[in-house]
Structures are given as C-alpha cells and as structure tokens.
Image (tube, rainbow, N blue to C red):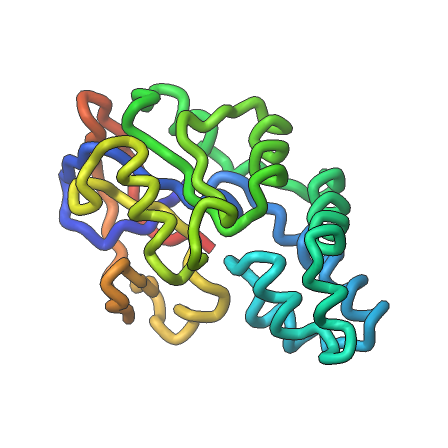
Amino acid sequence: MTLSTYLEFPIRVRGILFDMDGTLIDTTLIVEKHWKRWCEEHGIDYPTLIASSHGRSCKVVVGEFAPLHLRDHFLTDEHIRQFEDSVTVDKKGMIVIPGAVELLGPLPQTLWAVVTSAGHDMAVQRFAQIGVEPPVLVTIVHVARGKPAPDGYLLGAEKIGLNPRDLLSLRTRRRGSGRHCGRGKSYYWDADGDNGCRESEGGRGQVGDQEFSGVGGEIG
C-alpha cells in the first residue's frame, strides 16, 4: 500500500485521519455500477455525473443531477436511503486496499479516526464487512459541509482530542485532479484550500510510539 504525504521523512505525527473509500476500502466498481443504473432509469447523463461524484455524498450528487421536476422526491430521506442501502449490501467488486488492515492494526486506538463522505450506516457496514471497527467515525451526517470542505477533518481531530496541525490526513485524490502532474509527482489538497502538484517522497513515519514504513507514492 502506498500513501501520499508530500512531507520530508522521517516524520512524526500525533495521529492520523483516514478517508475511507479509495484509501482503506475501494468500492469504486460498486458505486459506479449503481450510479449508472440510476442514470439509465431516470434519463441522466452518466459520464457527466460520474466525473464529479467521487468523494461527494449521495444527497449532494442527487441534488445536482436529478431532473428538476423530480428533485424533491429524489431528495427525500427514503429515496436516499434506498439508494445507499442498495450500494451497501452489494459487496461484489469491493476491494480492501492492500496493507490497510495491517496498517490500522498496530495504531493506538486513541490516535486515529476515519472521515468519509459516505452515509453513516453505509460506512459502519463497510467496515464491519472487513472486520474493522474505527475508534472514531465521522460521516456525512455529522457535518454541515462535506468534502472538499475541511469540516469533517476538523471534527475528526476534535473527537480524538488533537490539534489538526499535529495530524496526518490520508485520503484519495479527487478523480482526475492530478493526471497532469506527471511521473514522480502527485496532486494534493489541504484544509486551507491550497492545491497543486508536489514531488512524491517515501520513507518512514511515526504515530505516537508506533513507527511505520513504505510511505510514498499516491493513492487513487
């Protein structure tokens, strides 16, 4: 498993905030399959929707692409729940990112959290399916603004009682955002809104008293 950090090594941080999909678990094939079906059923252009859907909550995507005359119906809690439930129970094509479970195992439970734009029930069930129980789980229901706003990460830091500046955030780059960066570089985005291309470096890191290695490259 390779992780983007763009920091000089060795590094020492007090905790880690993990994204879920694409960082610890990859459900891209499942999500895309269900969005394609939804688009076909309702006459929505699938390529346009999928190009901007990754990393965003179901409700936000539906609100943006649903036909105007059906938008109120599609944005009901019942419709959103039905869509999310259909995705959640579908495990065909789900991938556990290689090394993810092994990375989480030795980390102190008080020093890491998961921050995701997924629905809460979906996130809980996905982790149950791979036998992992995050000590802190921040989902779309816990924040007023989803990604790319930093609200979830700030809340995750608060819940584990650490200053955001002392944390390492591991997440998937937004789809297509870094394809122009070239070999040896990766796209980054931080809570201050800064973004662009940086050199990808590898090395060793430390979280509290726990050391880990093989950090470098990119996710996504």
Q: Is residue 184 left or right of residue 172?
A: left
Query: Where's the N terminus, which quadrant?
Result: top left
> Can residue 182 be seen in this snapshot?
yes
Q: Residue furthest right?
A: 41
Could you say where residue 38 lies in the image, as x and y percent from the top left?
78, 63
Say how many tags the image has: 0
Where's residue 197, x and y in %?
Answer: 28, 69
x then y, percent, for residue 107: 32, 23
Identified at 35% across, 71% down, the residue is 182
Using the rendered image of the protein, determine whether residue 22 is visible from the camera's viewpoint: no
In which quarter of the view is residue 214 placed?
A: top left
Task: Tell me the residue at 38%/49% (across/down).
Answer: 152
- Residue at 31%, 62% (x, y): give it: 188
Q: Establish if 43 lies above or below 92.
A: below
Image height of 4 relative to 196, above or below: above
Identity of the residue drawn at 38% across and 44% down = 2
